[in-house]
Image (cartoon, rainbow, N blue to C red):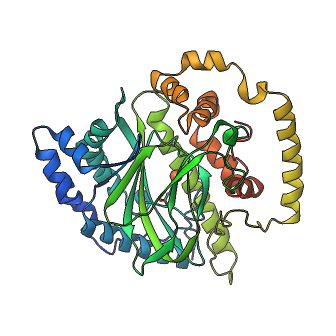
Amino acid sequence: MGNRTPRYQLKDAELTAIPVDAVISAQLGRALAEEDWKAAIRSLAKAHLDDAFSLPLLDPGFCSRIQQEVASFRSFSESSGHVSPGLLLGSRWYLNTISDRFQSMFDGLLKEVLRRVDEALFPEEHRIAYQQVYCINYEEGRDSGLKAHTDDSDLTINVFLGSPAGYEGAELLLLSPAPEDTACGTPRLEPGIYKGSSLSYRHEEVGTALLHPGDRWHAVEKLQSGSRWNLLIMALRNDAAWKRTFYEEEARHLSAKAVSYGEQRRESPGDSYTPTPAVPSCEMGAEVPFAPETWDALESLQGSLEIAKQDPPMRHIDIEGQRAREGPRERQREELGSGGSHRRKAKAKATPRYTGENIVMQLLELPVLQQLATCGVDGNVDG
Ligand SMILES: O=C(O)CCC(=O)C(=O)O
Ligand SMILES: [Fe+2]
C-alpha cells in the first residue's frame, strides 16, 4: 500500500466554487447592500451578552452541503487511516485539509463579509485578518461535550450546520466566571463550586452564527441524543506580527501529527482504524476514567500547581507592567470584570511561547497532557 495518504476527492465537486454572495444568507446579503449597512447588520443581530451576538450568516443550503461533505470526509478518513486530531475534541475537520480550495473561498468570505460584520458589531481598533476554519460534530459514541475553555482567536464565529436526526443537550454555555473561578486557570462548572454566571445558547437555525471574542470562556453541555454539526471560523486581528503565521504553524504541526498517526495505523496490518479517543464527558462531576499512570502524572502535576499557588510570581508576575502593555480593551474588560480578562492576561504573558507548535506539543504529543487538557485541569498550567 506504500505510505502515501490516499487523496480525498470532493463528493460535491462544485462546493468550493460557490461565489461569496451565494454562501451568505439572503438576509445578510440584503443588509450588506444597504447604504447604512452597519445599522442593518446590527438590526439583524441579536445580542446575547454585551460581546456575543447571533445572526443569520450563511445560506442554509450551503451549510447542509458543507455538513454532508465533511460527513463524507469523515467516513473516508476513518476507512483510510487519515486522522484529523482535535485539540480539545476527539476530532476536528479543517476544511483546507479536505480541499485546499476552501482556503481561498473562506479568505474571500472574510474580506468581503466577515470583516464588515465584525466592524458593525465589535468596536475594535483592528479588524479580523487571519482565519482557520474547521467543522466539529457531537454524536453518540463520539465527542459528546466540551469542557470550559477559551479559543485561540480574537473572534470566534460559530455557525450551526445542522442536525440530520435532531439533537438534545449539547447547549453552548457562555460563561462569565467570577475572579475566584479562574484563580487556578480553567473554571470548574460544578454547582456549588462555580461562582460566576452562565448563559445557555442552543444552536437552532441552520446558517445562524454566534459570534463572541475568543477570550470569552465557554463550554458545551453533554449531548443527550442525536448529533449536531458546526462550522467554526477562528479569526485573529491584524494587530501583531505573530498572528500572521499562527494558524499556518498550527496546521503544519497538526497535519504532521495526522500523517504520523495514519502511518502508524497502516504499519500495523490487521489493526482497524479507531478514531482519536472521544473526550471524556464534561458532564458536571463526571468520573473520568484515567489510567493509573495518568493519576501518577496528575499527582506530580498537582504538586507543581501547589508550588505555583504558594509562589504567585509563577503566574502573576508583573501584573502592573502587564496592564501597562495591555490595550485599552483589555483594561476596560478587566475593569468591567468581564469573562476572559484573567485568561487573556495569562495568554498575553505567554506570548513568546504561544505558538502553534507549542500548543500542539502540549496538547497532542503527551497523552497525559492531552487527557489533562480535556478533563478539567488547565492545559496551560505552565502558561
Ligand atoms: O460546539 C460549540 O458550539 C462550540 C465549539 C467550540 O467551542 C470550539 O470548537 O472551540
Ligand atoms: Fe471554543
From the viewer's side, name the closer residue of 154 and 197.
Answer: 197
Q: Position of residue 151 (x, y in %)?
A: 53, 46
Q: Position of residue 55 (x, y in %)?
A: 30, 53
Asked if residue 273 is positioned above or below residue 207 in the image, the reply reads below
From the viewer's side, name the closer residue of 370 and 25.
Answer: 25
The residue sitting at 39% across, 31% down in the picture is: 238
Picture quarter with the N terminus: bottom right
Report whether 43 appears left or right of 362.
left
The residue sitting at 55% across, 51% down in the picture is: 198
Q: Position of residue 78 (x, y in %)?
A: 54, 76
Report whether 273 appears left or right of 252.
right
The residue sitting at 36% across, 74% down in the picture is: 68
Report whether 191 appears left or right of 115.
right
Asked if residue 28 is positioned above or below residue 203 in the image, the reply reads above
Count up the numbered dots. 0
Location of residue 191 (image quadrant): bottom right
Location of residue 24 (image quadrant): bottom left
From the viewer's side, name the closer residue of 70 and 286.
Answer: 286
Residue 9 visible? The answer is no
Location of residue 271 (image quadrant): bottom right
Q: Position of residue 138 (x, y in %)?
A: 52, 70
